[in-house]
Image (spheres, rainbow, N blue to C red):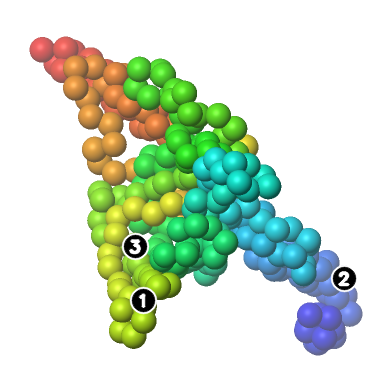
């Protein structure tokens, strides 16, 4: 940049150099501002980076062990702790732009893994996920019961010590756009029956958490990332039965959408009345 400025500056007669120098200075300043702006991370990248830094383990980088772990237990009087792990899994994710890959793996110390140990890789694009489909539920330490109230506002009597959570989500219009690759290892079988591999398409997936409070923050970030990648809710996530306001509103965007529809409907009605 400085060399270019010097060449251009010296090519003009002396009386014009001062004016030309000032103009070139302003031009170079503007170019510098534009270059600095292009180097900044986008909101999407900042969101996905936070999700990666907090959800995935980074012991050798930040000392973080992550939050992608879920376990549940059952009573066992013979065990020193008075319980045993029935099932458990760990989950991580990677991303490139809006392409995301989830990986789940059963914990080998769980009782379930003594019979069958499974792992799965799920790949999808965030723009294909319906942000209104995100459902978060805390789960109980014993029995893995949902700690959320049912449609009558009642909670299970087993919903105690809710120390982990699950966040499910679906694709827009229930399209089969999530590629799943499964590996199931049958510990007590041998030969060709010992391991089974298969691939399939799905319209839903999930994240597991070891902290329900953190899960709420992650769900908010995940919803933001979907929208920043161009994801939208499906056409029938809110059905106007008798009154559009009675539709189930799963997030603030849905409320804005319905409010906009009501506003446009009111304007249309006024236009019709005015022309009658």
Name the residue rendered at 40%, 18% in the picture.
Answer: 153
Query: Disc 3 or 2, which lies upstream in sequence?
Result: 2
Residue labelled with disc 3:
178
Instruction: Determine the CA span between mark 3 and mark 2.
Output: 62 Å
The C terminus lies in quadrant: top left
Q: Position of residue 176 (x, y in %)?
A: 26, 60
Q: Nearer the viewer, residue 140 or 101?
A: 140
Residue 199, horizontal then vertical, whole percent? 30, 72
Q: CA distance from mark 2 to mark 1?
A: 86 Å
x, y (%) of residue 98? 47, 63
- Give the x, y percent position of residue 210: 60, 47
Q: Which residue does the numbered mark 2 point to in the structure image?
A: 18
> Comparing marks 1 and 3, which lies closer to the viewer?
1
SS at circle 2? helix
How far is disc 1 from disc 3 in space, using C-alphas?
30 Å
Give the answer, above or below, for where 47 lies relative to 149.
below
Q: Which dot marks residue 106?
A: none
Whether 69 is drawn above or below 34: the answer is: above
The answer to whether residue 153 shows anywhere in this view is yes
Residue sitting nearer the eye, 155 or 238: 155
Mark 3 residue element: strand
Which part of the image, by quadrant, shows the N terminus? bottom right
Q: Where is mark 1, residue-wise?
A: 189
What residue is drawn where x is 47% and y is 64%? 114
* Outermost residue to the left: 276
**In the rendered structure, are the residues bearing label 1 and label 3 in contact, judged by CB atoms less than 8 Å apart?**
no
- Residue 17 occupies quadrant: bottom right
């Amino acid at each position: 940049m400085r060399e270019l400025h010097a060449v251009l500056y010296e090519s003009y007669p002396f009386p014009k150099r001062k004016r030309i120098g000032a103009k070139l200075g302003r031009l170079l300043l503007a170019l510098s501002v534009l270059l600095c702006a292009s180097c900044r991370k986008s909101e999407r990248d900042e969101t996905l980076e936070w999700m990666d830094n907090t959800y995935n383990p980074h012991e050798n980088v930040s000392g973080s062990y992550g939050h992608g772990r879920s376990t549940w237990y059952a009573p066992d009087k013979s065990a020193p702790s008075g319980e045993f792990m029935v099932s458990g899994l760990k989950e991580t994710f990677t991303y490139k732009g809006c392409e995301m890959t989830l990986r789940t793996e059963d914990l080998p110390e769980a009782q379930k893994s003594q019979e069958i140990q499974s792992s799965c890789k799920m790949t999808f694009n965030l723009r294909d996920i319906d942000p209104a489909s995100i459902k978060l539920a805390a789960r109980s330490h014993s029995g893995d019961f949902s700690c959320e109230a049912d449609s009558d506002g009642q909670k299970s009597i087993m919903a105690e010590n809710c120390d982990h959570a699950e966040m499910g989500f679906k694709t827009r219009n229930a399209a089969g756009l999530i590629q799943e690759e499964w590996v199931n290892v049958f510990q007590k079988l041998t030969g060709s029956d010992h391991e089974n591999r298969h691939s399939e398409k799905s319209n839903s997936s999930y994240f597991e958490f070891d902290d329900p409070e953190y899960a709420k923050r992650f769900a908010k970030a995940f919803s933001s990332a979907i929208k920043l990648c161009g994801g939208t809710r499906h056409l029938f996530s809110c059905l106007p039965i008798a009154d559009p306001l009675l539709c189930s509103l799963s997030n603030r965007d849905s409320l804005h959408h319905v409010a906009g529809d009501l506003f446009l409907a009111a304007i249309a009605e006024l236009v019709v009345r005015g022309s009658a």
